[in-house]
Amino acid sequence: MPMNAVYRGPDELPDVIPVFPLPGALLLPRGQMPLNIFEPRYLEMVDDALAARHRLIGMIQPDVAHSASAAQPQLYRVGCVGRITQIAESGDGRYLLELTGIARFRVEEELGVATAYRQCRVSYAPFADDFVARKGEEAVDRKALLEALSAFLKANNLKADWEGIESAPNEALVNALAMMSPYGVPEKQALLEAPDLKTRAEILVAVTEIELAKSNIQGETPLQ
């Protein structure tokens, strides 16, 4: 989804942002994430992001395994900020959003705030390369990625738009597959925190191969 705003570097984003903790949700730079917003605190968050005119929301996963409170779980240290690029009202009190990823961030501190939603002071400096579209995509092993995808689809009796897949640039392909992958919170976090696109693709291939091997061990139809 094209954006009206252009962000050229970390200094062009606010250092305090609202965050939306959502397990299993992975947003990556230039990726698109649909959201169905219905909780009052997150409806407030969307209203405030629009009123502030920055239209930014930080997506981050709760780290439930290391949390003392289920009501206020600890957050992972790395998330991704996205801009609201589409919004519609459902007619029953919900917002239907699409976020477009801009850059990853590292949480410096969570702030004590009066809002019902959580806010963090963040730094984008560790992820300055996120502002450069398609950076490092020439290093991606596209053949290995497509082979893993093909095996996964076959094992799960799924179909895909191969014409669209084969025409997609490496960055769009890797990030879309990572965001849509059905893996758990730790795997999604590893994909998010990958230092570069090549490593993210390698993690995606490795996790897929592990899941396929588990399926075969459990007696499901072999891929070969």
Image (cartoon, grey):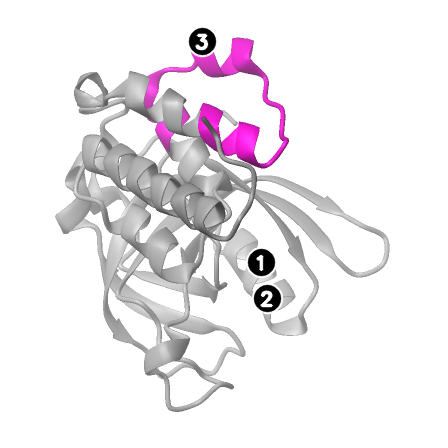
**Dot 2, crowdedness within 10 Å: few (<14), some or many (≥20)?**
some
SS at mark 1? helix
Separation (CA) of disc 1 from disc 3: 34 Å
Which is the main secondary structure of the residues drawn in magenta?
Answer: helix
Q: Residue at x 59, y 66 (%)?
A: 42
Q: Position of residue 220 (x, y in %)?
A: 56, 44
Asked if one can make out residue 172 in the rendered structure from this viewpoint, the answer is: no
Nearer the N terminus, badge 3 or badge 2? Answer: 2
Q: Looking at numbered disc 1 in the image, what kind of residue is underneath it?
A: Val
Q: Nearer the viewer, residue 61 or 101?
A: 61
Image depth: mark 3 or mark 2 in front: 3
Res 46 label: 1
SS at mark 2? Answer: helix
Q: Position of residue 185 (x, y in %)?
A: 41, 60
Mark 2: which amino acid?
Answer: Tyr
Residue 164 visible in rendering = yes
Q: Is residue 151 on the magenta stretch? A: yes
- Say which quarter of the image contains residue 110: bottom left
Residue type indicated by callout 3: Ser
Find out whether the residues at labels 1 and 2 contact each other: C-beta distance under 8 Å. Answer: yes
Q: Earlier in the sequence, mark 1 or mark 3?
A: 1
Disc 1/disc 2 C-alpha distance (Å): 6 Å
Q: Find residue 123 and report its horizontal and vertical position in percent.
A: 20, 57
Q: Which residue is mark 2?
A: 42
Q: Is residue 55 left or right of residue 108?
A: right
In this view of the protein, which residue sits in the foreground, 134 or 24? 24
Other residues around mark 1 within 10 Å, as few (<14) / some (14–19) / many (≥20): many
Magenta stretch?
A: 150-174
Q: Nearer the viewer, residue 53 or 40?
A: 40
The quadrant the C terminus occupies is: top left
Of circles 1 and 3, the one toward us is 3
List the residue tagged with mark 3.
167
